[in-house]
Image (spheres, rainbow, N blue to C red):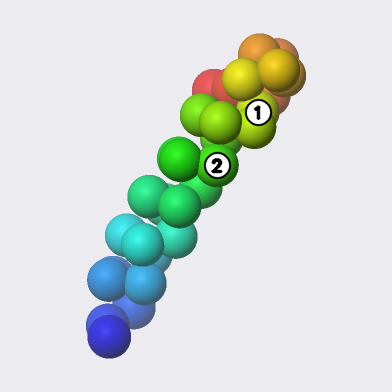
Amino acid sequence: MSREQKVAVVEAYLDCFATKDLSRFPLLKT
């Protein structure tokens, strides 16, 4: 797995996590 692939996976995970759990904290959204 290349570094770019790892970054893509992490970004997808964080996007999913943020959508589910950080929606309570709109000030943290960019």
Left or right, residue 8 beside residue 19: left
* Marks 1/2: CA–CA distance: 7 Å
The 10 Å Cα crowd at callout 2, few under 14, some 14 to 19, many 20 or more, is few
Q: Residue 22's mark? A: 1
Secondary element at tag 2: helix
Amino acid type, residue under disc 1 in the picture: Leu
Q: Going by the picture, which residue comes out furthest to the top?
A: 26
Packing grade of label 1 (10 A; few <14, some 14-19, many >=20) is some
Where 29 falls versus 1 (above or below)?
above
Residue 27: image x %, image y %? 70, 15
| Element type where label 1 sits in the image | helix
Residue 3 sits in quarter = bottom left
**Residue at 32 percent of width and 60 percent of height:** 8
Decide which of tag 1 and tag 2 comes sooner along the chain: 2
Give the position of the C terminus as an image quadrant.
Answer: top right
**In the displayed image of the protein, which residue is found farthest to the front?**
20
Side (left or right) of 27 relative to 23 = right
Q: Quick check: marks 1 and 2 in contact, CB under 8 Å? A: yes
Residue placed under numbered mark 2 in the picture: 17
Where residue 24 appears, as percent x and y from the top left, is 70, 17
Question: Up-down: is 10 above or below 15?
Answer: below
Report the label total.
Answer: 2
Q: Amino acid at mark 2?
A: Phe
- Left or right of residue 22: residue 4: left
Q: Residue at x 51, y 29 (%)?
A: 19
Nearer to me, 5 or 17: 17
Expressed as whole percent of the image width and height from the top left, the position of residue 12 reads 38, 50
> Quick check: 22 above or below 5?
above
- Residue 10: image quadrant is bottom left
Residue displayed at 27% across by 85% down: 1
Left or right of 27, for residue 14: left
What residue is rendered at 27% in x and 71% in y? 5
